[in-house]
Amino acid sequence: MANNPFPLSREDLLKVYRTMKTIREFEERLHVDFAKGDIPGFVHLYAGEEASATGIMMHLKDNDRIASTHRGHGHCIAKGVDVHEMMAEIHGKATGACRGKGGSMHIADLSKGMMGANGILGAGAPLACGAGLAAKFRGDGSVGISFVGDGASNQGMFLESLNLAAVWNLPVIFVVENNGYAESTSVEWAVACDSYVDRASGFGLPGVSVDGTDFFAVHEAAGEIIRRARDGGGPALLECEMVRFYGHFEGDAQAYRAKGEVEDLRARRDCIKNFAERVIEAGVVKRDELSAIDREVLDLIEDAVGSAKAAPLPTAKDLLTDVYVSY
Amino acid sequence: MARKISMKDAINEAIDLEMRRDPTVILMGEDVVGGTGSPGEADAWGGVLGVTKGLYAKHGKRLMDTPLSESAYVGAAIGAAACGMRPIAELMFVDFMGVCFDEIFNQAAKFQYMFGGKVQTPVVIRTMVGAGFRAAAQHSQMLTPIFTHIPGLKVICPSNAYDAKGLLTQSIRDNDPVIFCEHKNLYAHESDVPAEAYTIPFGEANVVREGKDATIVTYGLMVHKALEAADALAKEKVEAEVIDLRTLSPIDWETVIESVENTGRLVVVDEAHPRCSIATDVAAYVGQNAFGALRAGAQMVTAPHTPVPFSPALEDLYIPSSTAIAAAVRKTLASEQEAGGRRRAS
């Protein structure tokens, strides 16, 4: 085996590949099953964006909290939420991560530090500030991470949170996952500043912009600002400039995108393909090892879908429970 | 040992005692300390009306001034609650909820249910409510019904210092999100309050005056107007029972129904606007569940369906008066006689 030129161990590189591949196959399967009519409600897929969630979450432990978005499946998987429970939740089953009461847009698991996907764009930013505040009072060196898309980066509550985190010097990282589109509206049109680094400095916090399809770029940048936040250095903003392989939601015909755009992105900027090429070329990982992971991931997803389909639905008594802790 | 203190001091004392008892209790809001970063004294204000004055000296950094960013800091309080703290966020005036409502009704209220019972959010949002301060349309509203509409929120509105301390202590110890509404015209109102900590359970109304002729159901400042009305009615040999709901969600239906079954007449008094209010809620509930006990149609005394006006001449007309409450009670008595008259005629 060649010398490892990467900042992660061979085991960690295999873990990264497995995580990104699990997210991809989870989403590809949902794309197919949604079209078949197997999935109720809205589904927003994270396919193409895996390097961002994985590159950041590789630095986090269970007591680090993240506040996710409507496009949250990737964040959940990378943060360690159980894939079977996620799939059951998306199918509206009683065995789901939220017992079928949340669905795709509201998967949470506080035991893994996942404060919830969120159907309200930008609403996670104040919540992540709260996680950072709690961390500060506990003094345990943990951090809060707020994910928003380029669209939600224009929300008042997100912008207020940048200022609050800076004023209170909170251990909070704001990650702008810029996939170019707020639903169908271009970031070029909807975000008036030239770069997110400028926007961050306007609020008095450091900003970094990276190619969000390059796992190693995300991992390095995130590592630095997360370390800084853990050491009391305060908040920062990380822009991951990335690509969305599917529409805003499943069923979106994407007439607003250029002809051949997605095909081109899949060919040139597939974060998983590019990661695999780099680690294989460097001789640190063998193609066979990745193929074995591919098969295991497909088996995992197949098993998750099978058990989700077989799982019981919630019943009438579940309708009225858990509104309050006590009432 | 009980001594006479104001509702403002009772609230301050409840927070102080809970902060001593539980290190996870923190308090944040605009000027709750006052003067942070300013060249003069620290702890300059203790809240815009001085309710939290002195707590910074006792608890230091656990009290936090915030930028004028209700959405961010109310949301941060909710996020911190989900991460094991017991934050109290002060929303200076309830009228400001428009700029942070998402965090209250889409986040805090829904976590427990939406996440399958796995996330508790023990946050208290303290906020000033009510008219009479000549503070006009955007600093005077009684928006309690907006909160009671939302499943997942508990809504409290005390009428006196004793209840304020006990209910706020319960709110801080409670594991659900609580909207704690403090009537700004009651801050100076004094009653006997024990020095030690105590709780008042939610969902227990208080019969503040007993009477056999009519039931007046109300909360907050209107409790005092209802008592004035009951005094006036007593001179006419009409004995009105006055029920102080104290907590609006959960609400003590049992006490309300029991009283109406005894008196047969209901007047609901609400400082909120007339449509979809606590008044309509109580009237509808009694109509559905104790119709047979009613000897006359329920009457509602509320603010009019207008914004709160500024001019003292108008604001005094806006706030439900004891005269209007007494008139409503007389109306329930009169309409019973009419109904009886019709019955005799047929």
Image (spheres, rainbow, N blue to C red):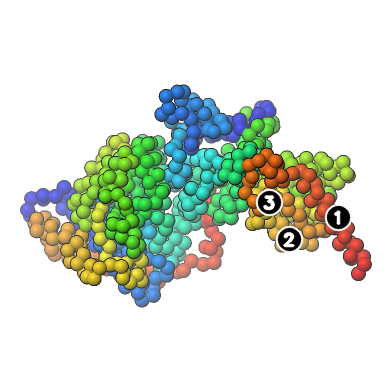
Label 2 is placed on what type of residue? Gly
- In the picture, the disc for residue B334 is 1
Label 1 is placed on what type of residue? Ala
Q: Quadrant of residue B126?
A: top right
- In this rendering, does residue B326 appear at all? yes
Whether callout 3 and callout 2 share a subunit is answered: yes
- 3 vs 2, front mark: 3
Q: Position of residue B106 (x, y in %)?
A: 48, 54
Which mark sits nearer the N-terminus, 3 or 2?
Answer: 2
Q: Quadrant of the N terminus of chain B?
A: top right
Which mark sits nearer the N-terminus, 1 or 2?
Answer: 2
Question: Is the residue marked by circle 2 packed among few (<14), some (14-19), or many (20+) residues within 10 Å?
Answer: some
Q: Quadrant of residue B297?
A: bottom right
Q: Chain of mark 2?
A: B
Question: Is the residue marked by circle 3 packed among few (<14), some (14-19), or many (20+) residues within 10 Å?
Answer: some
Q: Secondary structure at mark 3?
A: loop
Residue shown at 42% from the left, 27% from the top: B38
Name of the residue lying farthest toward the right: B345
Q: Chain of mark 3?
A: B
Q: Position of residue A220 (x, y in %)?
A: 20, 47
Q: Is residue B187 above or below residue A143?
A: above
Q: Position of residue A275 (x, y in %)?
A: 17, 58
Q: Is residue B88 above or below residue A259?
A: above
Q: What residue sits right under mark 2 in the picture?
A: B287
Distance between mark 3 and mark 2 Cα atoms: 22 Å
Whether callout 1 and callout 3 share a subunit is answered: yes
- In this rendering, does residue A311 appear at all? no
Distance between mark 1 and mark 2 Cα atoms: 19 Å
Q: Secondary structure at mark 1?
A: helix
Q: What residue sits right under mark 3 in the picture?
A: B304
Q: Chain of mark 1?
A: B
Label 3 is placed on what type of residue? Pro
